[in-house]
Image: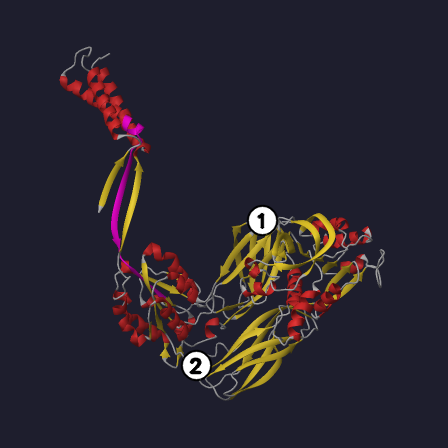
Amino acid sequence: MNSFLLGISGSWWLAVLLIILAVAFSIYTYRKTIPQINSMRKAILITLRSMGLALLLFIIFEPILTMVRSKEEPPKLAVLLDNSLSMGQSDAWGDRKEAVKTAIQNSGFASIDKDKLQVLLFSNDIKTPEGFSLNSLDFKGQQTDISHALHWVSANEEKDNIQAVLLISDGEFNTGSNPIYNAETIGKPIFTIGIGDSSEPADVALESIITNDNVYVNNPVPVNVNVKVTGYNEGQLTLKLFDNGTQIGEQQLNVNPEKQSFTAVFDYSPKQEGIHKLTATISTLKNEITTKNNTISNFVNVLKEKKKITIFAGSVDPDISFLRNTLAEDKGVAVETFIQEKGSEFYDKPPTQADLRESDIIVLVGFPINSTSIQVLQLIKNELDQGKPLLFIASQDLDYNKLKILGDYLPFTTISSKPQEFLAIPDIKPEEASNPLLRITGSESDINLWNQLPPVFATETFVRAKPESEVVAGMKVNNTPLKEPMILMRTFGNKKSVAFLCYGLYRWKLLGYASDVSKGRPNTPDLYDILINNIHRWLSVSPDKKQVSIKTTKKIYTNNESVEFIGQIYDAAFSPIDNAVVKVKIGGGTQERELILNSLGNGRYYGKIEGLPENDYFFTGTAALNERKIGEDKGRFSVGNIALEYQNLRMNSELLRSLSGRTGGKFYLPSQSSSFANDLKNLKNFIPRGITERKEFALWNYLWLLVFALLCFATEWFLRKRAGML
């Protein structure tokens, strides 16, 4: 149904009256003409003038034409088909591909009108085929992200009138968030068809290999290998660990009904620096569902020497002892301390430029004080100029005037300071849950733990956070939030710093963790150690001092997966370069490959290569500008059979039933899914919806109206001239 409405700015009575007057004026002006013309020509001239004047008056009143259109939009069913690797496997129930085919045929969704159907193929990404057929499914997706598919439905349900969802999957997601949350936000019934066997398959799987990202030559570190065994009550397994293909350890595991999960710990003591590939393999048992998860790898960066941390303190303080003890627990760290006496002297020995030159991180605890010499501050400043990271902890005796010498490297600017002391607790906002300094589990519950820390000391010091700084924690006094920050972090160019505008941090350990342990709560997290270690790791990861940084998006890829490269290119002043020529040479296979990365703007480059066979690879990336080399970067990656999809090969019927139960849908097995069509038909909300479209056209803004009015006047003038009229 269509309707039209013409409106004007003003009164229609006035508009009609003026048009009538314009017509009357036209008639009056042609009442007598010189020379006299016949009545036909006179009528034409009167009509032209009347039309021209009427159109001009019409435009002046700003007419708007409104068109209202109503129609019905049919309800739509969104079908989400899991297209990942696990859906192409076989288990105790048989071939999953055949189960998917049965589910599609029995559910009958393919016979629904095209305007009522939207089919999505999902794995780690989403595809919307134009015309769906069984050939559209290849079951090659490397991951399963159900929440991403449901998020697509949520984003399009209003636009496409999606009123129901059919999910065909094994329910095992290994990336993305829990799909339950996305399902509840959609507010539409979700019907699920479960594919696969819900019981644990007969399988031996290596779930993870865990060790430090950075280790040191000749410094042993533990390597944890997690093994999961399902479907077996007995058997012996041989677990081996390899470093760059050389076996470095072997353990025997005995399977029994009571124990089917194992964590094997190997001591790893690398002998050479560089990027090492650690690979764990485990023997197989009879009739395993797949052997593709019997191997797992990880990369570690082996560094040549220990990292040196230099601490400067204005006086003997408990914060120094606690800080030094926590840092020294890392076998790859050597801590050197310079504590100032009452005068300008230091206990043991004074610092030299050589001492600081060997340092990787500089820590100031209540330093400088009033008697600190300018020469020592200049030594520290010289090293901070080189981009060395800084950790700063305040104190009551801190001299903020002398601290200004190092002000360029701190995340704050001091406004004023008084030594009056008070107790304050951290005030950390929920949005800081992802902050690397505060990470415990990575969830929002971390913030609750941090905000329960005991109070520490602060002075009446007022500061201004620098623009590039981030306030990690504010402070509260008697549960009243203050505007002053307690913890700040900053990355600027190649310089990183963390500052505590408080002191007595040892109280977080003594009054927090130690107190809880003494009360019989040994599982309480040691927040002090976690915070210091997080800060140490964050400061140790240097902002990219290299002008050229080229990395792969992952260290380990599976067969048929594209290997993606990301580059960042800067000039000597660390300004992004967008027009460099960035080449990556890849070696390790049967032949060397070369890839040119494309600029994405702001110094970023991207490229990907496909079809690499299973192997270990190394690459060298170079960047040049106007045929002049800027720099290069190197790295390693692997292509193999290992995939997340093989880590868990059972149907997660609990999740699928929960998805359908919470949303008003229904769960089916493939053999039961023939009732889906009738269940969909009986849905009360699966009905068309009325849509009213309203469009407005500002006629006065259309040029053709004015052109037509002028054409009327021009034609009138032409005819008058032809008649020889005055």
Q: Which residues are magenta?
A: 57-80
Task: Say which quadrant the C terminus sits in.
Answer: top left
Most frequent secondary structure within the magenta stretch: strand
Nearest to the observer: residue 284 or residue 313? 313
Left or right placement of residue 619 versus residue 104 in this view:
right
Q: Is residue 388 visible?
A: no
Q: From the viewer's perspective, is 698 left or right of 439?
A: left
Which circle, 2 or 1, is nearer the viewer? 2
Residue 465 location (% of width, % of height): 64, 50
Judged left or right of residue 285, residue 455 is: right
Crowd around label 2: few <14 · some 14–19 · many ≥20 (10 Å): many
Q: Which element is circle 2 on?
A: loop
First in sequence, mark 2 or 1: give its number: 2
Amino acid type, residue under disc 1 in the picture:
Ile
Which residue is identified by label 2?
Answer: 201
Between residue 377 and residue 579, name the one nearer to us.
377
